[in-house]
Amino acid sequence: MRVGPKIALVGGVPILAAGAIAMAGWLLLAQEERARGGAVLVADVYHDIATARLVRDQYAAADAQDRQTYAERFAGLTARAEAGLGRLTGFARIDAQRSRIASVEAALARYRSQMEAFVRRTQENDGLIREMNQRADTLIDLTDRARLRQQASNADLARSLAEKVEALRVARGLVARLNALRVRTAESAVIAAQGAAQSAGQSTGQAADPAGPAAAESEAQRAQARFRAASRDLAAALRDDGREAEAEALDALTVEAAGQNPDRGKLDGWIERNLKIETSGQESLHDEVAQLLAYSVEANEIEQATQNVAIGTLKLGPRTAGALLHRDAALAERMLAEGERLARSAGALPISPLIQAEMIQALDGWRARLTTTIGGLRSQNAMIVAMDGLAATMIDSAKALNDAFVGDADRFGIFIQRILLVGAAGLLLFGALVVICVARSILVPLRALQGDMVMLTGNPAGAAVRGTGRRDELGDIARATAVFVSEITRREGALRRAKDQADVALVELRRTQDNLVRAEKLASLGQLVAGVAHEINTPLGIALTTGTLMSDEARTFRTGLAAGTLSRSRLNHFVDRVEEGATLLCTNLTRAADLVQGFKQVAVDRVSDESRSVVLATWLDDLLASLRPMLRKGGHTVERACPEDLVIDTNPGVLAQIVTNLIANAVVHGFRAGEPGRIAVDVSERDGGLVRMEVRDTGQGIPPEHLDRIFDPFFTTARSAGSTGLGMHIVHNLVTAKLGGRIALTSELGQGTVVQVEFPARRADTAARALPTAIGTP
């Protein structure tokens, strides 16, 4: 019996049984896959509905100008959920599932229509809010106009009050001097009468004091001097007041009253008459000053009330905006009552009727729109409640659908497991019995064939396979073995051709490596551009702010100059601010110019492959300045130590690429997230015209098992974070191939990493020097 029938006997029946089991399992797996696919679709629909609800809330809380984006995203999510429900119908297996899918579709359609109504209501409310803001701005402008008018009126009152006070002071001075002159006149008259009485007593022979006439005459002269002084003082006050005629009349009456035959009656009458006039004028001025003071107090109160209306409007706007943003209808109604109180306050102000009417009109318009907006808020809140109910219903239905599909898939999976377990056990038992019977009839000829194959393994060309003439399966195996020997010879040639193809691939790999180096240069240039934008933004922003402040100061100064209210202190303040602003402008613009010059030189170095002489300390400062934005994100600091007079002749672009990659590698791999670190770049001169550059960091270090693979291409421990594993490999190639130098790396866990790079200080040394790729300990 041939081996084939024997094998058919061994495996035919089990194969047929296995085929039947496989067919049943395939059908069941198809149903399970269908159920699993439905569960996946239900999960997508559930996610879209939940996300749409979140986007709805974001739409309600967003600013008016940003809401369109959320509305479009909501429409896209609901449309995708609706399409998913449509596809889910094809996965439904029973009518209950189809009915629940239909109910979710209907609820989703209502949900979308309610969202469209909500969007329309929100747009109406946004329009009303804009009109309210315009009304509030108009009201603030009107209160400013009223306040400015009241300030002008207060200034006029102040000038009038100052004039009246000055007039009152002059009147008081005149009254005081008139009273003094009247007193001196009366005193002079009394002393003269006493002298006359004494003279009369002497003429009648009465006894008198011998010193009496002389003392009386001396006293009369002093009284006369005081009288003339009081008269001159009063005349001078009259002339200062511009009353020249009255001063001359007083002088004439004074001369007449102080003569040999004094006549003081006219002077007394003139004094009494002018006292009455000046006293009356003084009382009138008192009344006018008191009235002006009352007007001034009232005007200040009006200005304060107007300012209170403006302040109330300014406070009312943000509070109303907050209430509308949070859809708080109760708070909005309180703001409406506050607006009504402001309207009453504005109506009670004694200001220009035209301005007052416009203010009341603006407040009434604001309140009317707020009333409409409050109704819209209540409508929005009701819509949100209804939409939340629909969303909850849809989410519950989606969960139920998911549970149904997952349950079907689980049932099918358990059924398949049982069928496979029973079928496998039966097949194993039947196969074992058949194999025991058939194996003995096959093993003996196979052992003979095995011996021939062992001989062919040692010498394929020196031995022949026996049994190629057999007509059974063993003969087929012998003939196949002969063919296998010939095939080995053919494949050796194919292996040689494959080696040639591998060499071509290696050349292509090196070309790709060069392209990656150029791409790394472009990435570094992008970091440089980001550094330029960030570093220059600060001084230019300060300069722009200073220029704006100087412009505002100049505008205020011009306004004061035009109004004629410019004072010396204001002029000094303006000069100080302008001088301070000019100093700030010069300082920050000079700093920006220095940054641009340094960044321009670094950019030229990075895109150029030419060699040039550079002062290494200055060049290194410019390069580190371009890397500060990358370091500032993690709070890292970088320090450099380099001889200030060290000048090298090298390729700055290659050197910049090396330093940038080393610092970036320390930032990405060396420091833990959220922990600031420190990087040190130390440069020193070595014997033999070499320069050593050490880049040290205080990071977490490199595990010992990774140290030998640091410079291998595509080796990285942060591939999940987007690293390619080419950074250090590119650094190694640049140091050894471009600079003709050597590089070494040492690290300990928890102690940081040190990278040492040595290269010739003069480019001419590169061709003549062949440095080893490892750096020994100095």
Image (cartoon, rainbow, N blue to C red):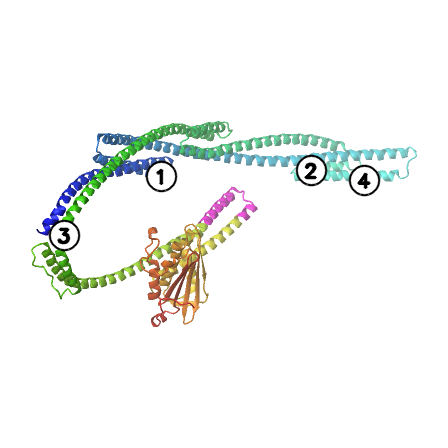
Mark 2 residue type: Ala
- Res. 521 image quadrant: bottom left
Q: Residue at label 1?
A: 66
Name the amino acid, label 3: Arg
**Lower position in the chain sequence, tag 4 or tag 1:** 1
Disc with the residue nearer the chain's start (4 vs 2): 4
Q: Earlier in the sequence, mark 3 or mark 2?
A: 2
Q: Secondary structure at mark 1?
A: helix
Residue type indicated by callout 1: Asp
Find disc 2 in the rendering and name its residue.
247
Q: Position of residue 64 (x, y in %)?
A: 37, 37
Q: Residue at x 67, y 32 (%)?
A: 278
Relative to 617, 739 lies left or right = left
**Residue 415 visible (yes or no):** yes
**Cα–Cα gap, marks 1 and 3:** 84 Å
User: For the residue carrying disc 4, how many other residues have a C-alpha within 10 Å: few (<14), some (14-19), or many (20+)?
Assistant: some
Disc 1 to disc 3: CB gap under 8 Å: no
Instruction: Report helix, strand or loop for mark 2.
Output: helix
Q: Which one is in front, 242 or 153?
A: 153
Q: Are marks 3 and 4 in contact (CB under 8 Å)?
A: no
Residues shaded magenta: 544-573
The residue that appears at 51% across and 43% down in the rendered structure is 560
Please say if 88 is above or below 614.
above
Residue 536 seen anywhere in this rendered image of the structure: no
Q: Which mark is residue 80?
A: none
According to the image, label 3 marks what residue? Answer: 440
Numbered disc in front, either 4 or 1? 1
Disc 4 and disc 2: Cα gap in Å?
24 Å
The residue tagged with tag 3: helix, strand or loop?
helix
* CA gap, disc 3 and disc 2: 163 Å
In three-dimensional space, the C-alpha distance between marks 1 and 2, rounded to whole angstroms, equals: 83 Å
What residue sits right under mark 4 in the picture? 221
